Image (cartoon, rainbow, N blue to C red):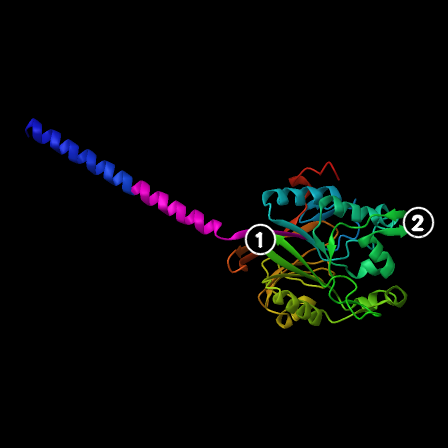
């Protein structure tokens, strides 16, 4: 081979290498960009839920062989998970007070509300135990007011909703039937309800001002109001029972039975009341319950199409507040 032919061949080889390298880089860049844009196409929303805390500020219990519970550990977990996603709302499904130990009950359960305030819970609903000392005391803990035993209390900074606790005099809900929260341009509608069995659990004297009506009717009536406002992401905070196996099978409970009758626009239901584990899908509705007493919480992840403003994916975990996986929160 002549010197000229050798140089020509070398140039051709270098050109081929440069061309192939460019094509591979371009493909890799475009492929990566496509994956990245697909991931970023949807808004990642997180809901962290607690139910049936019952003022257990200083009570620890075993969960799957590990010590769990206690206000300082629950707070540490909720703060950790909230930091991981700025689009996070904290919610609860009732019975946060009532049936409480002395650390809370001796002070009219004000310490528990202060705890929830420190964590900045966004939305909640009353359970049957919030009515243990009557309607006026429940309203005082929520809105603030005076008690002869503890003096003036500022109330909760959580927005409360209940669509089926009806004021007998006015015939309208005692609390707002829904709460709307906006995250990253998406409106999320929350509807609160309490089990109709509250009529049996709470003494007639303490519920004489209110009537507890059918949960399904209240949810569907309120859901219609939200849909009229164009809201397509609807979450129910229901102080009603649900239960399932860890993998979601063999689901039972009042909410599982109600689910087919509840408006299909409802996407997620946070359950309570029965103190059991639930992480299942009932009639298309993701339904969760995280035991009780702060020994676990529900993590619900939602992917929302920002254009259609609808949920395209939903999944949940029930996370135990195991002591040995986290340090207690110093503020609490």
Q: Which mark is residue 53?
A: none
Classify residue 15 by image quadrant: top left
Who is closer to the viewer here, 36 or 331? 36
Residue drawn at x 61%, y 66% is: 227
Picture coordinates of residue 180, whole percent (x, y): 66, 58
SS class, disc 1: loop
112 is higher (above) or lower (below) than 21: below
**Circle 2 or circle 1, nearest the eye:** 1
Does the magenta run of residues contain 156? no
Read off the magenta span: 24-49
Which quarter of the figure is the N terminus placed in? top left
Give the residue pinned by disc 1.
185
Give the residue pinned by disc 2.
149
Picture coordinates of residue 259, whole percent (x, y): 63, 69
310 is higher (above) or lower (below) than 41: below
Left-right relation of 11 to 92 = left
Residue drawn at x 79%, y 62% is: 128
Among the two numbered marks 2 and 1 on one chain, the one whose residue lies closer to the N terminus: 2
Q: Main secondary structure of the magenta part?
A: helix
Near mark 2 (Cα within 10 A), the count class, few <14, some 14-19 or many ≥20, is: few
SS class, disc 2: loop
Residue found at the very far front of the displayed protein: 229
Who is closer to the viewer here, 78 or 157? 157
Left-right relation of 19 to 254 = left
- Can the viewer see residue 253? no
Residue drawn at x 70%, y 72% is: 217
Does the magenta run of residues contain 31? yes
Which quarter of the figure is the C terminus placed in? top right
Residue found at the very far top of the displayed protein: 3
Picture coordinates of residue 212, whole percent (x, y): 79, 69
């Amino acid at each position: 081979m002549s010197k000229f032919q050798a140089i020509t061949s070398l140039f051709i080889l270098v050109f081929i290498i440069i061309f192939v390298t460019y094509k591979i880089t371009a493909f890799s860049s475009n492929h990566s960009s496509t994956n990245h844009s697909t991931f970023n196409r949807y808004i990642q929303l997180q809901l962290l839920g607690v139910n049936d805390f019952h003022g257990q500020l200083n009570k620890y219990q075993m969960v799957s062989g590990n010590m769990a519970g206690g206000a300082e550990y629950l707070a540490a977990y909720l703060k950790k998970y909230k930091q991981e996603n700025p689009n996070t709302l904290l919610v609860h499904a009732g019975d946060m007070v009532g049936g409480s130990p002395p650390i809370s009950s001796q002070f009219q359960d004000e310490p528990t509300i202060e705890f929830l305030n420190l964590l900045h819970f966004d939305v909640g609903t009353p359970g049957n135990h919030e009515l243990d000392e009557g309607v006026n005391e429940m309203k005082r803990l929520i809105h603030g007011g005076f008690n002869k035993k503890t003096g003036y209390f500022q109330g909760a900074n959580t927005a409360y909703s209940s669509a089926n606790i009806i004021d007998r005099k006015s015939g309208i809900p005692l609390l707002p039937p829904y709460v709307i929260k906006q995250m990253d341009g998406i409106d999320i509608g929350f509807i609160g309800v309490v089990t109709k069995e509250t009529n049996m659990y709470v003494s007639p004297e303490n519920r004489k001002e209110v009537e507890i009506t059918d949960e399904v009717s209240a949810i569907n009536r309120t859901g219609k109001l939200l849909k009229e406002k164009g809201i397509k992401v609807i979450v129910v905070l229901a102080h009603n029972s649900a239960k399932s196996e860890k993998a979601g099978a063999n689901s039972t409970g009042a909410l599982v039975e109600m689910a087919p009758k509840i408006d299909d626009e409802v996407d997620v239901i946070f359950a309570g009341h029965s103190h059991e584990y639930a992480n299942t899908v009932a009639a298309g509705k993701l339904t969760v319950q995280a035991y009780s007493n702060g020994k676990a919480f529900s993590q619900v992840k939602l992917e929302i199409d920002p254009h259609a403003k609808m949920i395209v994916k939903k999944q949940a975990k029930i996370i135990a507040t195991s002591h040995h996986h986290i340090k207690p929160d110093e503020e609490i």
